[in-house]
Image (cartoon, grey):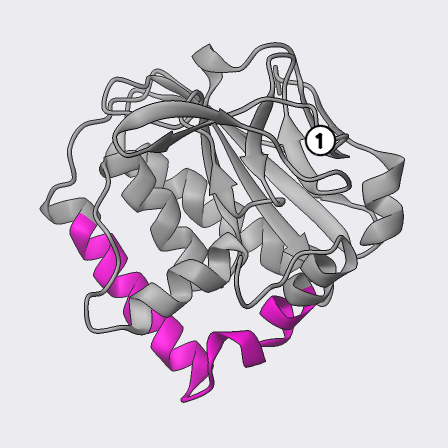
C-alpha cells in the first residue's frame, strides 16, 4: 500500500475491537450511476434483508458494537449513525439506496451486503498519510451546506479520520468531507473497510475481496491492491 494509515493509541484504547482493511485502486474509470451500479445496490439490499431476517439493523451484533463505540466517545448513535447502519436503514426504506456515481454505488453495495462501514477517498486529494485520532476540536472539516462549501470543526474527543490538511471524515465514518470524496473524475482511490468485534478477520477479508473483485470487473484496466486486515483486538 502506498498511503500510510495510522490508528492512534487513544482510539485503540477506546475501541479495542476495531480493525480495518484497505484497498487501493489506481487507474479507475468513474462516471454517473448506471444500470450495472444500480443492480449492485438492489442486489445488496436483497442480501441485507435476508441477513437481518426481520430484525432492525441496530439489532445486528456488528452494528450494536459500532453503537457502543460511538457512545464511548460521546456521540449519540441514534442521531449520528455509523455509515453502515445509516445505509442499511435507507436500503430497507421505501425510497431505497441513493445513486451517487459508479464507484460510490459499488462500495455502498459492499457496505450494505456485508453490513460494514466502507469509505472511499480520492487519493489525489489526500495530503500525507491518514490518521484515526481523537480530535482536539481545532481541526478543519470542509463540508457543504446550502450548496456552498463551509468549514466546520469536530468536537473535542470526537474520533475522526484526518490527513495533513484536516479532517476527511467526522465521527469515525459518519460524514465524509467534500475535499476527498470520490467524484465522476476520480481515477485513484483508497477504500477503507472498518470492523468491530465480533466481525471476524475472515468476514472482513471476504468483504474486501468482494470489493476488489467488483472493482476489477467494473474497471478492468485498473490496478487493485488489497491490504492485510489490521486488527487491534
- Nearer the observer, 29 or 63: 63
User: In this image, 165 relative to 188: left or right?
Assistant: right
**Left or right relative to 170: residue 133:** right
Foreground pick, 161 / 187: 161
Q: Which residues are magenta?
A: 38-65
Residue shown at the point (60%, 30%) measured from the top left: 153
Q: State the image quarter where residue 2 is shown.
A: top right
Task: Note whether residue 228 is visible.
Answer: no
The residue at which mark 1 appears reads as 137
Q: Is residue 52 above or below residue 180?
A: below
Q: Where does the image place residue 140, in percent across and percent down from the top left? A: 59, 22
- In the rendered image, residue 163, in percent from the top left (x then y), is placed at 63, 19
Q: Is residue 185 left or right of residue 204?
A: left
Question: In the displayed structure, would residue 84 be above or below residue 211?
Answer: below
**Magenta span includes 63:** yes
Above/below status of 71 relative to 57: above
**At 72% across and 66% down in the image, what residue appears?**
68
**Residue 227 drawn at (x, y percent):** 62, 33
Residue at disc 1, secondary structure: loop
In the rendered image, the quadrant that contains the C terminus is bottom right
Q: Quadrant of residue 92?
A: bottom left
Q: For the N terminus, which image quadrant?
A: top right
Residue lying at 72% horizontally and 68% vertically, measured from the top left: 198
Amino acid at each position: 500500500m502506498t498511503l500510510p494509515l495510522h490508528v492512534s493509541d487513544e482510539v485503540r484504547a477506546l475501541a479495542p475491537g476495531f480493525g480495518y482493511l484497505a484497498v487501493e485502486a489506481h487507474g479507475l474509470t468513474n462516471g454517473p450511476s448506471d444500470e450495472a451500479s444500480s443492480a449492485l445496490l438492489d442486489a445488496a439490499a436483497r442480501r441485507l434483508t435476508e441477513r437481518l431476517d426481520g430484525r432492525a439493523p441496530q439489532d445486528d451484533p456488528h452494528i450494536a458494537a459500532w453503537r457502543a463505540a460511538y457512545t464511548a466517545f460521546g456521540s449519540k448513535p441514534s442521531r449520528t449513525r455509523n455509515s453502515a447502519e445509516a445505509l442499511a436503514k435507507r436500503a430497507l426504506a421505501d425510497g431505497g439506496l441513493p445513486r451517487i456515481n459508479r464507484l460510490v454505488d459499488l462500495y455502498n453495495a459492499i457496505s450494505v451486503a456485508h453490513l460494514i462501514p466502507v469509505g472511499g477517498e480520492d487519493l489525489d486529494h489526500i495530503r500525507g498519510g491518514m490518521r484515526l485520532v481523537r480530535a482536539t476540536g481545532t481541526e478543519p472539516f470542509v463540508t457543504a451546506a446550502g450548496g456552498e462549501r463551509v468549514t466546520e470543526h469536530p468536537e473535542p474527543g470526537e474520533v475522526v479520520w484526518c490527513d495533513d490538511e484536516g479532517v476527511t471524515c467526522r465521527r469515525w465514518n459518519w460524514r465524509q468531507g467534500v475535499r476527498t470524496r470520490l467524484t465522476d473524475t476520480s481515477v485513484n482511490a483508497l477504500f477503507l473497510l472498518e470492523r468491530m468485534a465480533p466481525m471476524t478477520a475472515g468476514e472482513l477479508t471476504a468483504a474486501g475481496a468482494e470489493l476488489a473483485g467488483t472493482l476489477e470487473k467494473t474497471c478492468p484496466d485498473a490496478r487493485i491492491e488489497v491490504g492485510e486486515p489490521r486488527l487491534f483486538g
